[in-house]
């Protein structure tokens, strides 16, 4: 059940995405060939929670991505800000229209370094609210920390609960802590995928078959 009290203390993308308990989502990247091709996100019961439709290899199309609910309603738009040495992306509630103001931005903390460079998230509506994303997205190992260094979301490799086998990188877990907006967390995933897209497929690695997330206990 979503937490109304938690929602009052933070920017909320949409109703129903801030929970009283920690949740575990399964993120499935729909293609290994291009960053931002698409995502589907499922809960632990195998129900669709979010989706991002395929945009193809055109760079212009990947400068703006839209996170949707299962019915296609736009929840969040992330758009690359050009020019930007720090690869800054900005987030907008719902479908972005001309003149809309962003509610947050994500940028590299440093222009030096690549896969393990940290990212800074700034909330425009609340200057005191800031997040750091640490880790290596290409290895599916990232943590989102709030200003007090508490973990609010984590990205990890997905393990098949029936065989204990680590699945391919096209399937991974997104753990969202209680009180943090899951739609915001998925918005961060979209930006991470774009910034680190060139590292998505390991050099010389063979693509592993996509697996539909199974229902977990």
Image (cartoon, rainbow, N blue to C red):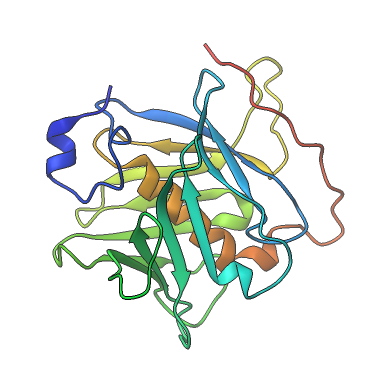
Looking at this view, is 88 or 48 the one in front? 48
Provide residue 149's location: percent of width, then percent of height.
Answer: 25, 52
Q: Residue furthest front?
A: 98
Quarter of the image where one finds residue 46: top right
The structure residue drawn at horizontal position 64% and vertical position 20%, both measured from the top left corner, is 214
Is residue 70 toward the left or the right of residue 215 in the image? left
The structure residue drawn at horizontal position 68% and vertical position 64%, both measured from the top left corner, is 199
Provide residue 139's location: percent of width, then percent of height.
Answer: 62, 52
The structure residue drawn at horizontal position 21% and vertical position 51%, both measured from the top left corner, is 11
Looking at this view, is 97 or 134 the one in front? 97
Quarter of the image where one finds residue 180: top left
Provide residue 6's location: percent of width, then percent of height.
Answer: 17, 37
Quadrant containing the N terminus is top left
The structure residue drawn at horizontal position 37% and vertical position 40%, both measured from the top left corner, is 182
Badge count: 0
Is residue 17 toward the left or the right of residue 47 in the image? left
Provide residue 48's location: percent of width, then percent of height.
Answer: 53, 29
Vertical placement of 116 versus 50: above or below?
below
Quarter of the image where one finds residue 179: top left
Is residue 140 toward the left or the right of residue 152 in the image? right
Vertical placement of 180 versus 132: above or below?
above
Looking at this view, is 159 or 3 the one in front? 3
């Amino acid at each position: 059940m979503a937490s109304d009290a938690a929602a009052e203390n933070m920017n909320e993308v949409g109703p129903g995405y801030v929970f009283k308990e920690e949740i575990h989502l399964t993120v499935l990247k729909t293609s290994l060939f291009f960053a931002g091709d698409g995502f589907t996100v499922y809960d632990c019961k195998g129900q669709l929670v979010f989706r991002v439709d395929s945009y193809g290899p055109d760079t212009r199309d990947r400068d703006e991505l839209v996170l949707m609910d299962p019915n296609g309603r736009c929840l969040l738009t992330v758009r690359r800000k050009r020019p930007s040495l720090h690869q800054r992306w900005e987030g907008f509630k719902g479908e972005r229209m001309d003149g809309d103001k962003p509610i947050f931005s994500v940028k590299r903390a440093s222009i030096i370094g690549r896969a393990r460079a940290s990212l800074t998230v700034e909330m425009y509506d609340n200057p005191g609210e800031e997040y750091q994303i640490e880790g290596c997205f290409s290895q599916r190992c990232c943590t989102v920390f709030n200003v007090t260094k508490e973990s609010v979301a984590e990205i990890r490799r997905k393990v098949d609960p029936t065989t204990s086998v680590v699945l391919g990188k096209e399937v991974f877990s997104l753990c969202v802590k209680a009180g943090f907006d899951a739609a915001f967390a998925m918005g961060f995933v979209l930006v991470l995928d774009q910034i680190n897209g060139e590292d998505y497929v390991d050099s010389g690695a063979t693509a592993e078959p996509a697996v539909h997330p199974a229902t977990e206990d």
